[in-house]
Amino acid sequence: MLTLYDAADSALTRRSEPIGEKTVWVDLLNPTKEEDVLVETALGIAVPTREEMDEIEASSRLYHEGGGHYMTAVVLHQSLVPNEPPISTPVTFILAGQRLVTVRYAEPRAFQLFVQRAQKKDTACMTGTAVLVGLLEAIIDREADRVERVTGEVDKLSQTIFRGKGGERTRTLRFDVNIKAIGREGELTSRSRECLLTLDRLLTYLGHVLTERGDDKQLRARVKTATRDVRSLADHIGYLSSKITFLLDATLGMINNEQNTIIKTFSVLAVALMPPTLVGTIYGMNFKHMPELDWTWGYPMALGFMVLSAVLPWIYFKRKGWL
């Protein structure tokens, strides 16, 4: 789908084809071959294919060709499947003169938010460069919201994992549920880190481009601010990744401790019940001459031996701190 936006009265207005003199933003969403050719013919640039956008080398994502500056970043967008984590998708920004061309195969929420603000005159968007900077700021804002949400979820997980004592923790804590939750947050932080890494590279490249082109100083200052924001978010994501790894290690350690406690209890019970079993086995033998068989107190004596032989090891283990 091809969407055109003109700059008029400090706002963006949507228009139909063809590309006019006031057109500052050409948005290609899941473009067809005909739409690619139309844009290439009108602006004299080459629209990259999806395979080219998926290239991971920096030279394939940030380069200058045919009068246009090509910049590709990985952006997260919400999956259509409920309760699924966001999905990574490449988005290419092409700065051709005073026009911006975006090529994407998904609909990140940041694009919709930026268009809404631009149509209300809430952001400067009189040139393609200004539109590009505004889009990047909207994407960074969305990433910041996502990082805040992950921070809150990780804090909740931390409180859940470390609350309670002893048996109370065992009854209230579902280790399998928490491991799955930790895995989800870990996957989300790794995808956010990839997104922020590509944004940092893109903003660094864009800063050099704006300096070479002699663009407005205010735009260059906004790019520098956006770069600092991205790096601070990347640092915070690194901290979250370390904390998630710690929570995973702690959860696995608790599982190991719970298993050891169970095995230890069974081992102690087995050892404590061995002497009573021995006593019961001795007096269960069918020999003819066993003095206690004809004694009135023989049965109570055997039971007493069994109880005493079980209680003494238990007391010993308690004093040793093994229970």
Image (cartoon, rainbow, N blue to C red):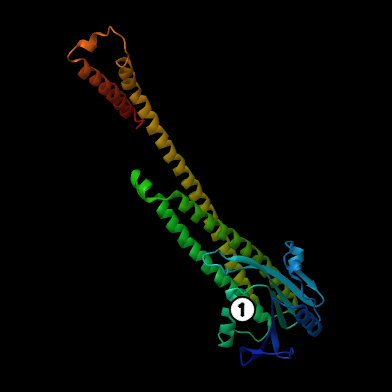
282 sits to left or right of 136: left
257 sits to left or right of 31: left
Q: Residues within 10 Å of mark 1 (few under 14, many from 20)?
A: many
Q: Position of residue 26 (x, y in %)?
A: 70, 82
Residue at which label 1 appears: 134
Residue 29: quarter of image: bottom right
Q: In which quadrant of the rendered image does the C terminus lie? A: top left
Q: Amino acid at mark 1?
A: Gly
Q: Position of residue 258 (x, y in %)?
A: 42, 40
301 sits to left or right of 197: left
Q: Nearer the viewer, residue 271 or 12?
A: 271
Q: Is residue 217 visible?
A: no
Q: Is residue 157 above or below residue 309?
A: below
Q: Is residue 160 above or below residue 35?
A: above
Residue 76: quarter of image: bottom right
Which residue: 57% across, 58% down? Answer: 187
Q: In which quadrant of the rendered image does the N terminus lie? A: bottom right
Q: Is residue 124 visible?
A: yes
Residue farthest along the top direction in this orientation? 289
Which residue: 40% across, 36% down? Answer: 262
Q: Nearer the viewer, residue 300 or 26?
A: 300
Q: Position of residue 68 (x, y in %)?
A: 77, 77
Element carrying mark 1: helix
Q: Position of residue 252 (x, y in %)?
A: 49, 45
Which residue: 49% across, 56% down? Answer: 181
Number of labelled discs?
A: 1
28 sits to left or right of 123: right
Q: Is residue 288 above or below residue 204?
A: above
Residue farthest along the bottom direction in this orientation? 9
